[in-house]
Each structure stands twice: as C-alpha cells, then as structure tokens.
Amino acid sequence: MAIQAVGTDATAGESVKAPAESIESITVAHEIIHHGGRQFICTPEMARIFLTHAQQVIESGDEQLVPLLHSGGIELLLVSRATPYSLDVVSSS
C-alpha cells in the first residue's frame, strides 16, 4: 500500500511505503444498530446521531422515520415507543 507523502522532503508524486504492522495495528471501531430483526453497521458518530433523534421522537410520544447512514447506504427506520432497537459497540483490529 503506497501512501502519498505530505509535508515531508519527498518530491511530487513520490510515494512512501507504510510498514505493514502500522496498517494492521489500526483499530477500527464501529457500532451495530439492531432494528426490526436487521443489523446496520455504522460509525460511532452516525449511531449517536440516530440514537439522539430516536430518543427525541420517543420522548415526544411521536412516531417517525429516522434516517440512519450505515455501511450499506441509508435507511429510514420507524421509531416509536413500541419499536425495539439496540446498540452494540464493536472494536476490531
């Protein structure tokens, strides 16, 4: 994997090889939203946005379609007091 050098003495277009162990040691965190028998893998930021909006909908006693941006695209998920959903935090290296 070649990484373009930025802010170094490298000339334009020169690439620098990153050590394999540094790439493999990067920890990627993601979260899984469980809703309606389905699982949606998303970033922690997107999960928090969804959960915040869902909580506002439930607290208001309303029922709404709440958007969730996940690894497979975007979904509108129905959120109400009767709709069960949960969150799992996954960390992989």
Image (spheres, helix red, strand yellow):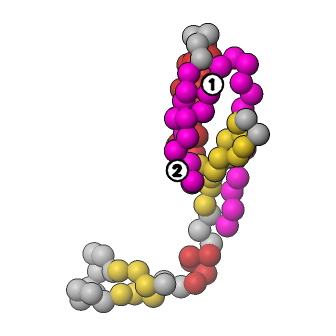
Which image quadrant: the C terminus?
bottom right
Nearer-the-camera pick, 32 or 76: 76
- Identify the residue at the far left of this view: 12
Q: What residue range appears in magenta?
A: 64-93
Q: Name the side, left or right, on which 44 lies relative to 10.
A: right
Residue 2 percent coordinates (x, y): 43, 85
Nearer-the-camera pick, 71 or 75: 75
| Label placed on residue 60 | none
Residue 20 percent coordinates (x, y): 58, 84
Indicate the amino acid at tag 2: Gly
Residue at position x 61%, y 61% from top? 28
Asked if residue 43 shows in the view, the reply is no
Residue at position x 35%, y 80% from top? 4
The residue beneath circle 1 is 79
Q: Tell me where residue 61 sits by quadrant.
A: top right
Q: Name the side, left or right, on which 55 lies relative to 7.
A: right
* SS majority, magenta: strand
Q: Using the numbered discs, state the Cα–Cα distance from disc 2 to disc 1 in whole angstroms.
A: 18 Å
Residue 60 percent coordinates (x, y): 57, 10
Residue at position x 23%, y 86% from top? 12
The residue beneath circle 2 is 73
Location of residue 87 with respect to 57 vertically, above or below: below
Nearer-the-camera pick, 8 or 14: 14
Location of residue 18 with respect to 65 vertically, above or below: below
